[in-house]
Amino acid sequence: MISTLWHQLLDMLMPRLCVACGRRLGWSEQTLCASCLMHLSRTGFQHSPLDNKMARLFWGVVPVERAAALFYYEAHSKTSQIIYDLKYHDRPDIGVMMGRLAAREFEASGFFSGIDLIVPMPLARNRQRQRGYNQSRQLAEGLSRATGIPLCSRAVSRSAFRKSQTTMGRWDRQANVEGVFALADADALRGRHVLLVDDVVTTGATMTACARELLKAGDVTISLFALGFAKS
């Protein structure tokens, strides 16, 4: 009772707003209001993780066990606002919350079955210093807390951030991430089924480059998760 009254008082003094629509949150709502949570443009990829629009990006490119994203990402939409706030508005809590949400919604499909380790897409050091955190690690943290699968953020590193890929085509994106990842702890990965986590997948170039580096550990199975999948 005291805790509930305290949270209600805090909400009166410092109203919390929905990251998608800006509406004031109710005391029981977290990060997203109930309406936005209900109407997110979900992909449903977890129900066909071997064959969906995201998985097909990697066919014949890099061996992937399964792949799924929670929702479709579109510019100037509520989903893009969620990711923008996560990355640029000092809101690491959004990543943890969305990771937990995805874990709950994917649970019935068995998407996480057999996965041994969750690996977030690394950021270059200068990029992480600017942001203060790695948004993919926050997503991975939420997934890990909800599923109980261990998180490993030291397995692979990123040596550089060259330029934003927002306006790049598929081949330019591939060139932009060529050689920027380096395997850092092969022993942590060898013999494991690894879930690689990123915030948004557009062409799959970044995930492909990172997955190829993870595979160098030997005897590694790769699956992929993204918060958003960009509609072409």
Image: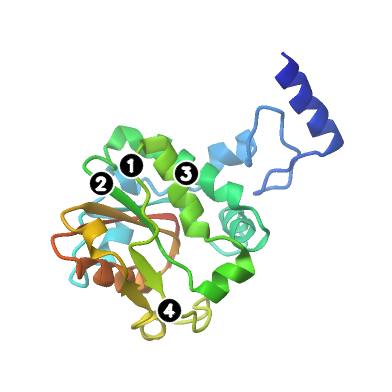
Seen from this angle, which residue lies furthest left? 219
- Which quadrant does the C terminus fall into? bottom left
Calculate the distance from the C-alpha at mark 4 to the C-alpha at mark 1: 27 Å
Q: Is residue 105 above or below residue 140?
A: above
The picture places residue 107, in percent across and down from the top left corner, at 34, 35
Helix, strand or loop at mark 1: loop
**Number of numbered tags placed on the structure image:** 4
C-alpha span from label 1 to label 2: 6 Å
Q: Is residue 231 above or below residue 127?
A: above
For mark 3, what is the residue? 142
Among all residues in the image, which is located at the extreme right?
A: 13
Q: Circle 4 sits on which residue?
A: 159
Q: Earlier in the sequence, mark 3 or mark 4?
A: 3
Circle 1: residue type: Ile
- What residue sits 37% from the left and 61% below the top? 154
Q: Secondary structure at mark 3?
A: helix
**Disc number for residue 149:** 1
Residue at disc 2, secondary structure: loop
Q: Amino acid at mark 3?
A: Gly
107 to the left or right of 199: left
Tag 2 residue: 116
Depth check: give the residue in front, 150 or 21.
150
Q: Position of residue 147 (x, y in %)?
A: 36, 37
